[in-house]
Amino acid sequence: MKASRRDFIKISSLGMGGALVSGALFNFTKGSILSDTFQASDSFTRTPTYCEVCFWKCAGWVYKNDQGDIWKIIGNDDDPHCNGRFCPRGTGGVGMYYDEDRLKTPLIRREIGGKQVYEEATWEEALDHIALNLKKVIDKHGPECMALFTHGSGGKFFGDFLKALGSNNITAPSFAQCRGPREVAFLATFGEIISSPERIDIRDTRCLVLIGSHLGENMHNGQVQEMSDAIDKGASIITVDPRYSTAASKSNFWMPIKPATDMALLLAWMNVIINEGWYDKEYVEKYTYGFEQLKAHVQSFTPEWAYGITSLEPEQIRATAKEMADAAPAVIIHPGRHVTWYGDDTQRLRAVAILNALLGSWGRRGGYYNPEKIALPSWPHPPYPEPKRTWRDANPGKYNLAIEVVSNGVCDATIPSPDRDCNFKAWIVNGTNLITTLPDQKKTLEAIQNLEFMVVIDTMPMEITGYADVALPECTYLERYDYARNSEHREPNIALRMPATEPKYNTKPDWWIVKQLAKRMGVEDYFSWNDIEELLDWQFRQVGTSLEEMKRIGVKKFPRKYDDLYFHEGQDVYFNTNTGKIELYSTDLLAEGFDPMPVYTAHEEPPNGFYRLNYGRAPMHTFSRTSNNPLLHDLMDENNLWVNPRVGREWGLHNGQEVWLENQDGALSTFPVKVRLTERIRFDSVYMVHGFGHNNKQLTRTHGRGASDTEMITNVKTDPIMGGTGMRSNFVTFRVENPHKEEVTS
Ligand SMILES: Nc1nc2c(c(=O)[nH]1)N[C@H]1C(S)=C(S)[C@@H](COP(=O)(O)OP(=O)(O)OC[C@H]3O[C@@H](n4cnc5c(=O)[nH]c(N)nc54)[C@H](O)[C@@H]3O)O[C@H]1N2
Ligand SMILES: Nc1nc2c(c(=O)[nH]1)N[C@H]1C(S)=C(S)[C@@H](COP(=O)(O)OP(=O)(O)OC[C@H]3O[C@@H](n4cnc5c(=O)[nH]c(N)nc54)[C@H](O)[C@@H]3O)O[C@H]1N2
Ligand code: SF4
Ligand SMILES: [Mo]
């Protein structure tokens, strides 16, 4: 077989040999969180951190025993993200540090004897090689032909590096594969985005409506805690989910909606709430724009109409509308987070936003609060050069309402096409496993083959690292400083991450990597601090604290500037929309040629013998990043395929049986997945947890365990408003015999 431009490199590195590779370190036993491995000790030292296992970024303390082993991580009591408690993944974060499969030293792709291999390199060699190649791309195509894909803390250093070089094509999958549609929808409605942690006052709510948000499996810490407190205080929970989720099991109402039909339910709820006069009249009158148009618009969307589409009983639709209205304004129709489902997602989230507006929950206790954060100044630097082109020029006329760079837009524009005069030529990929993260793997791989250069910075040998020209090993969050966490909340607060221990192997933090690269690329003026301690201490001193104090306390809270967590009675409020009001009728969407009010459109149905592929989270894993983590792997080592027993009978499937998946376009799963027969999933769908089915053999624990949902997502419904990738219009069928057998024997 001829080598393609960029072969996936499976074999371990060539060259300097085993010196840097230590043997298996610890033999973790089932369920243990280190306690079987290390001696308990009376004398501990503790250092502050914030967790990097997911993006809730809980602040905690890392404890080391007197042998210097990291012993445990626990939550910081002062932290509003976690209130002193970590989720199972956060506790298991120690496994990221101890994982013996980690990337251990820089690797450079070389062609030796016609075969592509990774050669171990020193940091000097790797950084020189990167600088040389980025300069080549810049000289030939301009700096705007570089893009950064990033997810996670170190991204800001690389972002600043790219801006210093003259490109602002900085993108994260957390927009177009995740929360983008809700941000654009809420911005169009209220003039503000939701952001993270979500500004929802679950603590004080009387009714929480979850539309697909599977809290309890989605373990975003503070939110899950507040939900359980709210339940204890008697709040009612309404869960709309085709699957009997953990949240559904805690709910007063479970609405097992037919997948892909939520818009019909939302419109019917509006119809009932408006026609019964259950909306907040004073609020709507004072704060909103377009009520009369909305009222006329929803007249035909009765619960009876919605019943035919959603399969939800009209009586249940009315009863739940009443439940929400009785609780209003202390009601939250949850804005969701991973909301890129069917391609009309911005409009669905507009419907969610409008419903909240009708019930007057925005700006009200138990609804949506007004979050605040402090302004932590940036280290002074020269102005960034003005890029001559941006990702928008590569996607002319598209996604004008996107408020962040659209990752799949950058990916598309990396594949040469006669329709566009600009292509991306170099990618820097930091902390995102694009192969499992972007839908339509074939396209992602095609884009990568068209690159002149790709650098990947990761802690683990993931699928994406196998395609890098240079792979750089970052040390884990337990071994490094990062920028302080500064996210908005009820009270402004900041959190420090500092190293609990020295970096293992030959790994380095992003701040160091970027500073070294900046020097080599002649943009060191933008990073004129000596080291990160100087940078952090300077920043902290601008807001009345210091690195020394932050090391002691980990989290610092600041008083709010204004008493504006909620609206005051009768307060005049200016909303940052074209009309200065909450826009039930969106002037922005209209101006862009889209429906100013949400409409229902039918989505594709599964062909005969196929089932809609539904996917989600497991409490003990985060995407693809934790499946090889020794501690979390012990808690869950593969995903299963949830299949309704009726479907199981039709196919003669039994519990635990391995099946391969094939989708509507003929894509086959590389690995089999075990069937789990359960009434908790509808007969028209199957369900699996995202993040398994790794095909990189260097992930020794998780390679080949379970199946990958991403491999089955080839039909992508792009949201025309903001470019989000709807991923739930894929249908799978079962292959009970190994479809790869022939390939193996031939
Ligand atoms: N099929 C499918 N696709 C999805 C989703 C889905 O459910 N199904 N979910 C979507 C959503 S909601 C999101 S937010 C995105 C998330 O997408 P990603 O952010 O790409 O998530 P991960 O798959 O966890 O990839 C994170 C990468 O960061 C690496 N990493 C971990 N810690 C560090 C670190 O400290 N430093 C560096 N440099 N690297 C680190 C990990 O090893 C891993 O390679 O995926 C989206 N894509
Ligand atoms: N443990 C854990 N927690 C996490 C993460 C993680 O990786 N692990 N990732 C975090 C991130 S970045 C994100 S974005 C969130 C994602 O978490 P959510 O925003 O909660 O995820 P979704 O993918 O929107 O929702 C998944 C749920 O939607 C249901 N569903 C599927 N189709 C439909 C439909 O047509 N209608 C309705 N109403 N429901 C449907 C599924 O059955 C499933 O229960 O989780 C966050 N929390
Ligand atoms: S929710 Fe869990 S994994 Fe996410 S940051 Fe908090 S402790 Fe870490
Ligand atoms: Mo996400």
Image: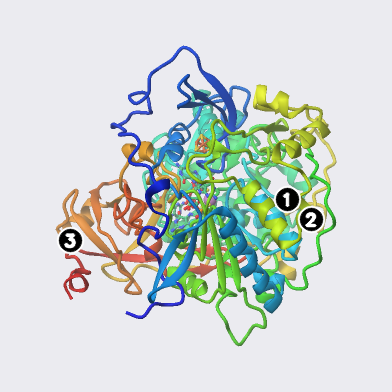
Relative image position of residue 56 (x, y in whole percent): 57, 39
The quarter of the picture where residue 111 lies is bottom left
Residue annotated with mark 2: 577
Tell whether 377 sits left or right of 228. right
3D distance between C-alphas at marks 2 and 1: 7 Å
Which residue of the protein is positioned furthest toward the top in this rendering? 42
Is 177 in front, or is 481? 481
Q: Residue at x 52, y 29 (%)?
A: 225
Local SS, label 2: loop
Find disc 1 in the rendering and name its residue. 190
Say above or below: 136 vs 177. below
Crowd around label 1: few <14 · some 14–19 · many ≥20 (10 Å): many
Q: Can residue 299 be seen in this snapshot?
A: no
Q: Which residue is nearer to you in this view: 38 or 94? A: 38
**Real-space CA distance between mark 1 and mark 3, rounded to the nearest whole angstrom:** 49 Å
The answer to whether residue 273 is visible is yes
Q: Is residue 44 left or right of residue 511?
A: left
Give whichever of discs 1 and 3 has the lower sequence position.
Answer: 1
Look at the image and tell me in which quarter the N terminus lies.
Answer: bottom left
Classify 10 Å Cα crowding around label 3: few (below 14), some (14-19), many (20 and above): few
Report the residue marked by disc 3: 651
Query: Residue 170's spot in the image, x, y percent?
Result: 66, 60
Figure check: 552 above or below 674: above
Residue at (72, 29) in percent of width and height: 547
Q: Which of 385/305 is in front? A: 385
Say whether marks 1 and 3 touch (CB < 8 Å): no
At a point 49% along the width and 24% down the height, the residue shown is 64
**Residue 236 point in image, percent of width and height:** 50, 33
Q: What is the residue that sits farthest to the bottom in this orientation?
A: 418
- Observer-nearest residue: 420 or 382? 382
